[in-house]
Amino acid sequence: MLVALLSLALFAQPAAAWDPFADDDFDPGPYTPPDRAPFVIPEDVYLVTEVYTGNAVTTAGETTTYSTTTERDTPGTYARVIDVVGTGSGSAFDGASFNGRTNLPDGRQVAGTYYEDFVVTSGGLVSVNIVFFQDDRETRIGASSSPVPTPAPTPVPQPSARPTPVIAVVPVAPTPRPVATPEPAPEPPPPPPAPRVATAAVALARDGAALAQIDLLRGRSVHLWPRAFLDGIPARVRTWRLVSGTADVVSRRDGGAAESCDVMWLTLPPVGTVWTLRFEVTSDEIPGRTLTATIGVAVRSPALGE
Amino acid sequence: MRSDGGSAAVTVIVLLPLLLVVTTGVLQLGALRVLASRVATAADLATLAAVDDQDEAELVRSGGFRLAPDATAVARRFFALNLATLADELATSPDAAAADADVAAFPNVPALDPLTGWRYERPTVRIAAAVPVRTPAFGTLLLPRTTVVNVRAASAAR
């Protein structure tokens, strides 16, 4: 047993697996990189077939339309929709487009679509600019204007195999096409005339200043003149009527332009009390309307100092 | 038994002048106090009369209360008129007393009266006067026959 173990230890050698190609002189040859994968235009990127030429604002009757003008061309560039905005809604691309985004007369931004333009290079698509295509309209109703709710414009792909939306392109060549120079927008329609404001107030003289409150001594008579104003300009009073409030002495409770309401207080109200007189006033220059004029009267009386 | 009649007579003779002096002084002081009150009332009424008017132009313009432009003159005039009822007891004429009075108007508020130190929150008219009045009883006591009554009055429209 001992001899057998010693023999194994002395004559043992490592086992080697058989290599079937050990005798072959294999040469893999020079390294050749694999062929590049063919460039594929992404699905959401379209070939440009019409280019941006400017913004257009047209007015027909009470409706103002904000649109974009284009011209037919295929400069070989691509574009994709990056944002569709509604009237007045903001976008992360506001201010990023080269042609800007127009405002409505009320200050809100018009609706439309932001496109990003690309050129194809050996490295793939390279973004060159962003353009905004406005698509909105506004209808004025009476004195107030409000844009007709327009759904956010949606780019409509062409039914062809490769959709070709109307988009703008700025070529990367050093001689850019003048497609990015928007036409000057027509003058916006003049704002409608502001509604006329009719007010009434009480003065202490026929053409005196309108007063909200007066400090009057007890026993002193004062002439109250109800007055009417149209856009801040005095309007001739046709009639007036004292509808609420009273005094100890009231000369008359209704009258015309030539009469004043003479009042006087003989009693002192509690401290801090202000009597309020309310008049209804009519004017020929404000037909069909009855205006309300109020005046507060704080009745005072002399008193010794404390 | 001794009589004390002489002793009583001596006491009366000795104390009667003192009693008269005290009585005279008390009566004159009382009269002076009443007079001073009437002079003060004359000043109070004068300031009230001055304040019982307002600037018409300011009322029409702003509706606010402003003292009449002649407020001080009205106060002085009414002070003289009120003192006229006390003319017999004054050591000067009512007009002279009113003319010598310090009458001031404080149309702009708040204001601090430099003479009295009073603070006014409303337009105020103030009279400060030193009115000489007759005090004849004091003369019999070898005191001044004239006493000066100092009054101060102020009124405002509240």
Image: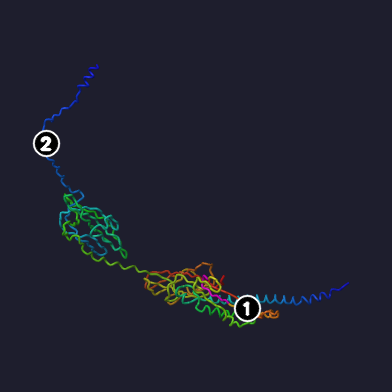
Most foreground residue, A23 or B34: A23
Q: Where does label 2 land, which residue?
A: A27
Residue B13, horizontal then vertical, whole percent = 79, 77
Chain of the residue displaying label 2: A
Segment tinted magenta in the rendering: B120-128
Chain of the residue displaying label 1: B
**Mark 2 residue type:** Asp
Residue B148: mark in rendering: 1
Residue extending farthest to the right is B1
Q: Is residue A223 above or below residue A69?
A: below
Most foreground residue, A109 or B36: B36
Residue A142, horizontal then vertical, whole percent = 31, 65
Q: Is residue B24 magenta?
A: no
Residues marked 2 and 1, same chain? no
Residue at position x 22%, y 62% in the image: A56
Tell me the mark number nearer the camera, choosing from 2 and 1. 2
Q: Quadrant of residue A206?
A: bottom left
Q: Are marks 2 and 1 in contact (CB under 8 Å)?
A: no
Residue A76: mark in rendering: none
Q: Is residue B45 above or below residue A270?
A: below
Left or right, residue B152 beside residue A13: right
Neighbour class for label 1 at 10 Å: few (<14), some, many (≥20)? some
Left or right, residue B79 beside residue B1: left
Tell me the element at label 2: loop
